[in-house]
């Protein structure tokens, strides 16, 4: 990806004169940066996020008794086989399952006054946003848009 970006930035983008095409070129360059950052960071971020979310679900399970069976079920599920390399697709499958249960837990927390559980969820969501910022925000901040 980096070599494609280099070629694009060194040979293609500088030779675009039309203002509309130049604008499209800048957008394309930003999207390539987004993809490169995602390739570099997403696997580890998903791995870290899934471990983090598992610990949060364990901690909040007592506060959401009507969801605790679902929490136990998703925590017991094996998304990656023993000794298997965790591909991004498998990490995404795990993340989707864990986040679905988190959403159900958040819905259930509206019925409870457990401030500790609420705080754990808010803190987790903040950490999740920080992990994803590398490819969701950082590559776009301070860059020209046109």
Image (cartoon, rainbow, N blue to C red):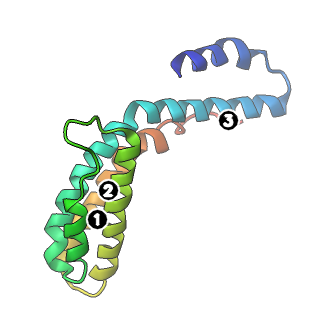
Where in the figure is residue 42, as x and y percent of width and height?
39, 39
Residue 56 placement: quadrant = bottom left
Label 2: few (<14), some or many (≥20) within 10 Å?
few
Q: Measured along the vertical axis of the image, is residue 138 above or below residue 21? A: below
In depth, the one of 77 and 145 nearer the eye is: 77
Where in the figure is residue 19, as x and y percent of width and height?
83, 30
Q: Measured along the vertical axis of the image, is residue 110 above or below residue 11? A: below
Quickly name the residue at label 3.
Answer: 27
Q: Residue at x 67, y 32 (%)?
A: 28
Question: In the image, is 6 to the left or to the right of 54?
Answer: right
Where in the figure is residue 58, as x and y percent of width and height?
15, 65
In depth, the one of 143 and 139 nearer the eye is: 139
Quickly name the residue at label 2.
Answer: 126
Labels 3 and 2: the sequence-earlier one: 3
Question: In the image, is 117 to the left or to the right of 1?
Answer: left
Q: CA distance from mark 3 to mark 2?
A: 28 Å
From the image, which quarter does the C terminus lie in?
top right
Q: Residue at x 17, y 58 (%)?
A: 55
Q: Residue at x 30, y 39 (%)?
A: 86
| Mark 2–mark 1 CB contact (< 8 Å) | yes
The numbered disc on residue 122 is 1
Where in the figure is residue 39, as x and y percent of width and height?
45, 32
Q: Secondary structure at mark 3?
A: helix
Q: CA distance from mark 3 to mark 1?
A: 33 Å
């Amino acid at each position: 990806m980096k070599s494609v970006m280099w070629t694009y930035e060194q040979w293609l983008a500088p030779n675009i004169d039309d203002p509309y095409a130049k604008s499209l070129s800048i957008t394309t360059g930003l999207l390539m940066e987004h993809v490169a950052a995602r390739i570099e960071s997403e696997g580890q971020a998903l791995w870290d996020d899934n471990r983090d979310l598992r610990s949060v679900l364990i901690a909040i399970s007592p506060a959401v008794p009507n969801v605790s069976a679902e929490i136990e079920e998703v925590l017991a599920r094996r998304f990656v086989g023993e000794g298997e390399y965790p591909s991004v697709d498998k990490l995404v499958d795990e993340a989707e399952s864990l986040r679905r249960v988190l959403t159900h837990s958040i819905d259930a927390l509206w019925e409870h006054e457990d401030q500790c559980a609420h705080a754990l969820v808010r803190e987790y969501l903040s950490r999740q946003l920080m992990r994803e910022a590398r490819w969701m925000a950082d590559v776009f901040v301070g860059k020209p848009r046109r």
